[in-house]
Image: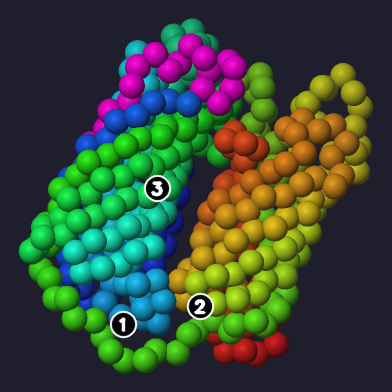
Amino acid sequence: MRSILLLCLLLTGFEGITQNRTNWGFEARMRSGFLIGHRVVMGHLANDHTYAAELSYVFRTNGEKSWHKHYKYPELSVNLYYGSVGNTEILGNFFGAYGSIAIPFVAQEKFRLNGKLGCGIGYTGKVYDEALNKKNVAVSTHLNALINIGLDAKTYFRNNWITVGVDLTHFSNGGFKVPNLGLNIPQVSLGYGRFISRNPEHSTLERPTAIPQRVLILGTTAIGSVKEVFPTNGRAYPVFALNIHARMFMKPKVGWEVAFDAISKQAILGYRPEIKKSQWDITQFGIYAGYLLPLNQFHFVLGMGAYAKDKYNPDGRLYHRVGMRYYLKNGVHFNFVLKSHWGKADYIEWGVGYSFFNLFNGKK
């Protein structure tokens, strides 16, 4: 799981962490909310409100890359998170570190309304233990992926700002070890920030968009992962998958994709073990559609799919994806996506793929 932290903090720099930062500062934020018991067996966990504090290093993009202007000069941040998650006795407190981007829906000189996306890692000292902490059915590993999505409003005065927000924070290990129902925590927040260095001017250079628009891009991604199933401390099974997709970008910041998924999730062999199963029996086929948020070579991914073939249906007919991809200029891309079923993580899709139309030079 340490590799998740490295990947998230590197990639959520969004190619901008090396830019000439003329607008940067710090923000402190307090959060309060509650734990969602998204499964019946979690009903005993949510016995208190959640409280958290967050400290962030924030910098605003300045137009050095084409996507800065397309997204109204979003703010990037590296964030430290610490707080309770609804039941300190069983779940403990979580410490997290993650990178995020705040993309303005409304961008004015003294006011911004932002959508926020972030990814990183969280740590807790209390996990499931057969003898000592059997009631913790949500978390079984000390290190977990942290995913944050939200909405916040910022009001600026001189070099300062006040922020009010609402967001959802998710902790889970991606099905690497069970039990892993995961934690979903909606929260409201109030914060104060200050620019240490501020230059309101943006680069006026017109920079060409790196991604071709209204061009159908075909590609494939090979995916591998690991998934453990009950009983606890049982066997960890490999996952192999192949994704064949078609993508198109309608605008510099709007893209879509459709895909065919072929999945060999060996953990299904452990589902109803009294039934003898062949490799064909456990093979799943799915049809998927997703939304793409491109930032030049770095893309956010969010979508939903349905299984067309799933003989044993252990998780329901629908599945979801949220994550990121990074594209090299030779057409190769790297995939880091969480696959889930209605808030319950299935596994993390680690993958490498190839686009038969090179996004960045138009070569087939």
Alpha-carbon neighbours of circle 2 within 10 Å: few (<14), some, or many (≥20)?
some
Dot 2 or dot 3, earlier in sequence:
3
Q: Which residue is mark 1?
A: 64
- Residues tagged 2 and 3 counted as in contact (Cβ below 8 A): no
Instruction: Tell me the kind of residue under disc 2.
Output: Pro
| Residue 11, picture quadrant | bottom left
The x and y percentages for residue 22 are: 17, 74
The x and y percentages for residue 19 are: 27, 76
Between the residue at mark 2 and the residue at mark 3, the CA separation in whole angstroms equals 22 Å
Task: Tell me which segment is drawn in magenta.
Answer: 37-54
| SS of the residue under disc 2 | loop
Q: Nearer the viewer, residue 67 or 1?
A: 67
Q: Nearer the viewer, residue 328 or 79?
A: 79
Between the residue at mark 2 and the residue at mark 1, the CA separation in whole angstroms equals 16 Å
Q: Which residue is mark 2?
A: 252
Q: Residue visible at 26% across and 45% down?
A: 164
Q: Which residue is mark 3?
A: 150
Asked if residue 138 is among those painted magenta in the image, a careful observer would answer no
Dot 1 or dot 3, earlier in sequence:
1
Q: Is residue 56 above or below residue 72?
A: above
Instruction: Tell me the kind of residue under disc 3.
Output: Gly
The x and y percentages for residue 231 are: 66, 19
Camera sees residue 43: yes
Q: Which mark is residue 4?
A: none
Dot 2 or dot 1, earlier in sequence:
1
Camera sees residue 337: no
Q: Residue visible at 49% across and 7% down?
A: 131
Q: Residue visible at 72% across and 41% down?
A: 318
> Is residue 108 shown left or right of residue 291?
left
Image depth: mark 2 or mark 1 in front: 2
Alpha-carbon neighbours of circle 3 within 10 Å: few (<14), some, or many (≥20)?
some
